[in-house]
Every structure is written in structure tokens, then in C-alpha cells.
Image: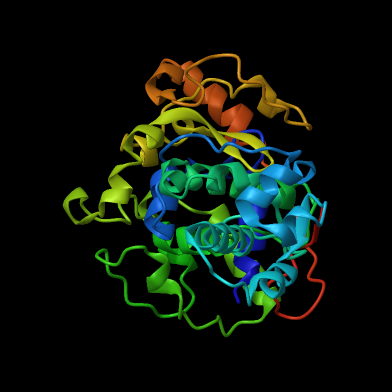
Amino acid sequence: MDVALLQVLGEKWWDTTHTFIFEKLGEMTLTPKDFSSISGIPVHGNPLKMDRRIHKNIEQLTKLVGQPLATIGRRRVKLSWLYTAYRNMQLRNIEDHDILTRVFILALLGCTLFARSNKMVHLYYLPCLASIGDIGSFNWGGAALAFMYQQMDDLCRHNTHCMGGLWKAWKVWAREYLPCVRVTPQSISSKVFPRSLLWSNCPPPTMGIAALLKYYREKLTNLTLDEVDLCPWGDEEIQPYYVALNEVANSSRILLVGPNGAEWYLGERVSMQSCGIVPNRIPQLPPKSMLVREKLVIITKPWCLSGKSASEFWEEQTKENCEKYKREVLCTITHHKVQWTGEDSESDFKRDN
């Protein structure tokens, strides 16, 4: 597994903007359209409806997931326990079928979109699963993307050594946009969706960790526009419907509600990706909630969850603003050195300043 690529991406990530900052190129990020193209899940729908005290509501839990979970009295459970408790459940009526469906989807969330290193899943997603027919109406893609931003934030702050969620999507994103990091041969087809299928059997790099770190750092530090593929997903006519659903979110500043809170996607900072405008436009400052260590986001404006056009957050494209942006953003990169702490496993992501 190419752990070195994730570590070097973490060195380029700014948690105050949710973007990678490349000194000679500008800002890029995993956009809603990117996430959907890679995962097959649109960033579209209603915000997740979560209840963080549902584990205390025995009556509601019994109705939604039956006795095993209703009587355990915990906010979260081990996935292995969930499998064991419901493996031999007898299906006597339609209610039992619905219960098992909810438990299956809860386990699926815990090992994919919101996977954690402790292999546990929280119960507060259950209100979203109450009506089987309405499960698809929620913005699962937006929640998963928010969770991925949080995971990358933790990595760049040195708060984690093991990324969760759909962490492999970061590597797919890098290999699609940045041909220079494709250290193993791979035939590229713009017609394969979701694009994660194209890279699922990609052989691991043959170089050692130290050599890979040096290689990726050099490539990403010197990355220029002519080394970037700005249309990795091909023409719109070949893109599946779930990619098209992201158009509004992709070209917006929008707040994504995730399992650990809400996170901003700032389309104005990556106009090359979000709006097809090259080079990137000069963005306004990010929301104040992103500029503090503890990012408590309070939704005070009605447009936050539906988004507002990225173009409303651009500064005037003057020479003075361009120089200020280069001086205050692109030229203030803090470089980090990665400290490899073990074997070539997926779970080691530690670094030191």
C-alpha cells in the first residue's frame, strides 16, 4: 500500500481551507464532483438527521433495530458484535426484514463511509435509517466527504496515526489529477466509473518508503500547471448521473454535515476544479470558524447547507491582490518531515515537524 503518498499529501494540506497548497501551482482539493466520481456516491440530498442520545431511547431502538441493540445501552458498538448478534436473526414478518436491513446498513456505514480504526460504529445514524424508502434521500456523500476532511485535518495536525473513512479515495484523487505520482504502470480510461474500480488492483510501488517520500515531496513541491490533468473524469456526456448531481455543490461554498460536525468545502479557492477557470481566482478569507483550532461551526445563515456560488467569494483579480495571495498563502508553506514508524502497513501515518 502506498502509505507514503498519503503522508506527503498530509504535509500539503491546510486545515484552515481544506485544500492542498502547492507552492508553484496554487490550491487544489477533493471536490464534491471528485468524491462522487471516485466513490459513486453523490454529494446531494438532505443533511443527515442524527440523534446522539438515541442509545438511551430503548423504545425507539427496539422499534428500529430490535432487542440486541436496544438493551446494550451504548453509543457505539463493535462491528464484530453487530455481526454476531444479528447473524442468525429469524425473519418472521416485514418488520423483521426492515430491522435487519437497518442493521446491515449501519454496519456498512461503520466499515466504509465512516470507518474508524477502532472498528466501531455509532448508533446516532439510526434516525436516517428509520424509513427504508427515504434512506437514499440523505446526503451520505456530503457526510462522507466532511468526514474525510476531518480525517485529513487530524493527519496534518499530528492528531492521528490511522486515517478512517474512504481514505483510499485520496490516493485515487492524486493519481487521477497528478500523473507525476503514478509510480506504477496503469492504463487510464475516462469511461470507468466509479473511478476507484480502475485503481483497486493497482500494484504497490516497488520503491522503499524513504525513496517514495523523497520522490513525492520533490514532485509535489515543484508541481506546475502543465503537470496536472484538470479533466480527469472526461467529458460530461460520459459521466454517470450521480456525478452530474454534484454540479451545484461543486461550484459553491457549502457546509457539509458529517458525523463529527459540519465542515466547509470552499469552491472559490479551487476555481480550476470547481468552475474550470485557470488559473485559480483570488479567494476571500475562509469562514472564521475554520481559522481556530477547535472548529465549532454554528449555522447562522440559511444558505450554508444549500451553498452559495463560489464566484461571490472571489477578490478582484488585480496585480496587488495576486501578489498578496502569493505572499500570504503560497509562500508561507510549513514543511514537515515524515517519521516512518513501522512496516509498510496502511495504519502508519506519523510525522514530526
Q: Nearer the viewer, residue 49 or 345?
A: 49
Residue 285 is drawn in which quadrant? top right
Question: Which residue is located at x 55 percent, y 30 percent?
Answer: 326
Count of marks, rendered view:
0
Residue 247 is drawn in which quadrant? top left
Q: Nearer the viewer, residue 46 or 31?
A: 46
Residue 56 is drawn in which quadrant? top right
User: Residue 36, image x and y in percent?
Assistant: 40, 52
Q: Nearer the viewer, residue 195 or 184?
A: 195
Can you see residue 56?
Answer: yes
Q: Taking 13 as reference, is 283 above or below it?
A: above
Residue extending furthest toward the front: 92
Question: Which residue is located at x 46 percent, y 79 percent?
Answer: 202
**Residue 46 located left or right of residue 104:** left
User: Residue 139, image x and y in percent?
Assistant: 47, 41
Residue extending furthest toward the left: 237
User: Residue 37, image x and y in percent?
Assistant: 37, 55
**Residue 25 located left or right of residue 262:** left
The color scheme shown is: rainbow
User: Residue 307, image x and y in percent?
Assistant: 44, 25
Which quadrant does the N terminus fall into?
bottom right
Can you see residue 279?
Answer: no
